[in-house]
Amino acid sequence: MVINLIEHHSLISNWVSELRDTQVQTDRMRFRRNLERIAEAAGYEISKKMPWVEKEITTPLGISTNKVLKEQPVLATILRAGLAMHNGLLNYFDKADNAFISAYRKHHMDGSFEIRLEYMSCPDIENRILIISDPMLATGASLVKSIQFLKEEGSIKELHVVCAIACTVGIEFLLRAEPKITIWCGDIDDEITAKGYIVPGLGDAGDLAYGAKVQN
């Protein structure tokens, strides 16, 4: 299932437009905050689909019966670009366990690249709901490899991906690898360059959020 959060005009449309705008992008703090906001909105929507139970709450004046989450999800992200969106999800699922994966593109002289995974910190994910965030779903290669890496730690009950901008190519690749996944997108673009960048996209989300990196 693919859910494009921008289909119905809301504040998400404003946040996505600012992420794309080269003039607004110069404000790194605002760029990070907009990624965070999109993740918060996605987290709210995901929470509607999660199992709940009724719980009796003692108030100063009596007892109130309320619906609460039956279980907490595991929040995962890909370092470093995913940190802002991860923080947005954590703002809402504030009791969640967390997983972090180091995945990056190792570029070659001919312009091609491969996905390298070098680190993972992960709680017990057996039979749990997993929400993984990554600002840009371009080719989908890093997400597929990261999910496969996580699955080596346990059987995931339910899988959600949250991204700011997705490309149709990456969505199709991800759905072929994980047919039961739910993808939550701030917006969807149709074009991708030979080097794996989304067009019009917004550029390199990690660099815009945290500064340019040395590419070895």
Image (cartoon, rainbow, N blue to C red):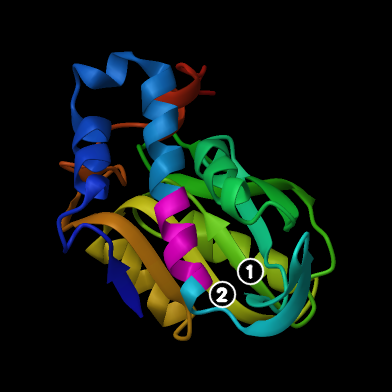
**Residue behind mark 1:** 130
**Residue behind mark 2:** 159
Q: Position of residue 187 (x, y in %)?
A: 24, 54
Q: Position of residue 66 (x, y in %)?
A: 64, 76
CB under 8 Å between discs 2 and 1: yes
Q: Which residues are magenta?
A: 40-47
Residue in view at x 49 percent, y 59 percent: 43
Q: Using the image, determine if residue 56 lies above or below residue 212.
A: below
Magenta: main secondary structure equals helix
Residue in view at x 37 percent, y 27 percent: 31
**Residue 193 seen:** no
Residue 65: image quadrant is bottom right
Residue in view at x 52 percent, y 17 percent: 214
Viewer-closest of 13 and 100? 13
Q: Indicate the secondary structure of the residue bearing disc 1.
A: strand
Residues packed near mark 1 inside 10 Å, few (<14), some (14 to 19) or many (20 plus): many
Q: Using the image, determine if residue 37 lies above or below residue 124.
A: above
Q: Using the image, determine if residue 215 lies above or below residue 152.
A: above
Q: CA distance from mark 2 to mark 1?
A: 5 Å
Q: Using the image, determine if residue 164 lies above or below residue 123.
A: above
Label 1 sits on what residue type?
Leu
Q: Indicate the secondary structure of the residue bearing disc 2.
A: strand
Q: Position of residue 114 (x, y in %)?
A: 51, 49
Q: Position of residue 194 (x, y in %)?
A: 24, 46
**Residue 132 seen:** yes
Residues packed near mark 2 inside 10 Å, few (<14), some (14 to 19) or many (20 plus): some
Q: Earlier in the sequence, mark 2 or mark 1?
A: 1
Residue in view at x 43 percent, y 19 percent: 29
Q: Quadrant of the N terminus?
A: bottom left
Viewer-closest of 156 and 91? 91
